[in-house]
Image (cartoon, rainbow, N blue to C red):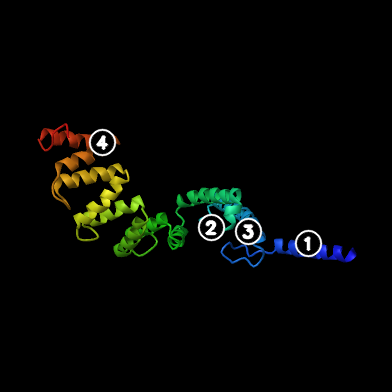
Amino acid sequence: MNRIIQLAFAVLSVVALSAQASSCDPKTPPKLDPKIALYNESNCAITAMDTAHKHTRDAAAAESKSDTLRKCESSYAALMVLDKYKEGEWRVSYKLIAEKVDRQYDETQARFIQSTCPQKLELYRHLANKGDAWAMYNLGAAYTKGSGVPQSDDVALTWYIFAAEKGNLDAYLALGKLYSDGIAFKPDYALALDWYTKAATAGDAGAQYTVASMHRKGLGTERDANKAVEWYKKAAEQKFEGAKAKLEEMYKAGEAKRWN
């Protein structure tokens, strides 16, 4: 009986030690029992949230002392701690903890994006390399403006295309502008119309107005009053300024009939 009890204690001790051991990295292949490994990672996520809270408090304290450098460093550190747990198999079994991680991350990121911290560029690049379309667009915008990086329309174009391929509406608009304003590249109205139409189809009122105007003028396509009216109407329905006036202008000029 004593031997059985000793074995039982030995097993419990191994389990207890296993439960304490953890890589604290959801990307690391678990070397323990899968259930224990997932449990460990969920605990690591909780610890990460506590750590991020400390960084956030430090950032607030730094801001009160006008210590911008420390504020930015602490805010970015908070995001990176949480970012580590934005993915991982453990999230399926521990959804409530995962939701708390996501909520804290989103709140922290929202405050950080409103700041002027130079680390924003690091965040965009980090997320863009993970396939985040929003970050890809923001990287493109940074290169367009030369904000924190050497100004480069070619690099901006690359990131905009990456973002657009993932369905980012802002990237559609940016590409339409790049190809139509003739500042960065020689105007290619057909390409511009294609990107603006994607944004218009997605419901952007400004893009709908632009697409209508391009069809009316024959930019990148043949003139088509009916299509112009169609898109002006869509923009007008969203109360986009000037769309209704353009419709009336076309009706009075005889370019289209009011019943179209």
Judged left or right of residue 96, residue 211 is: left
Between 161 and 90, the residue placed more toward the observer is 90
Q: Secondary structure at mark 1?
A: helix
> In the image, what residue type sits under mark 2?
Glu
Residue 205 versus residue 192 in the image, above or below: above
Q: Which residue is mark 1?
A: 12
The CA span between labels 1 and 2 is: 30 Å
- Where residue 107 sits in the image (x, y, percent)? 52, 48
SS assignment at label 2: loop
Q: Earlier in the sequence, mark 2 or mark 3?
A: 3
Secondary element type, mark 3: helix
Mark 3 or mark 1, earlier in chain: 1
Circle 3 residue: 38
- The CA distance from mark 2 to mark 4 is 42 Å
Determine the image quadrant of residue 149: bottom left
Total numbered labels placed on residues in the image? 4
Q: Which mark is residue 236?
A: 4
Please report the residue visible at 26 percent of the width from the left and 36 percent of the height from the top: 236
Q: Secondary structure at mark 4?
A: helix
Precedes in sequence: disc 1 or disc 2: 1
* Alpha carbons under labels 4 and 1: distance apart: 70 Å
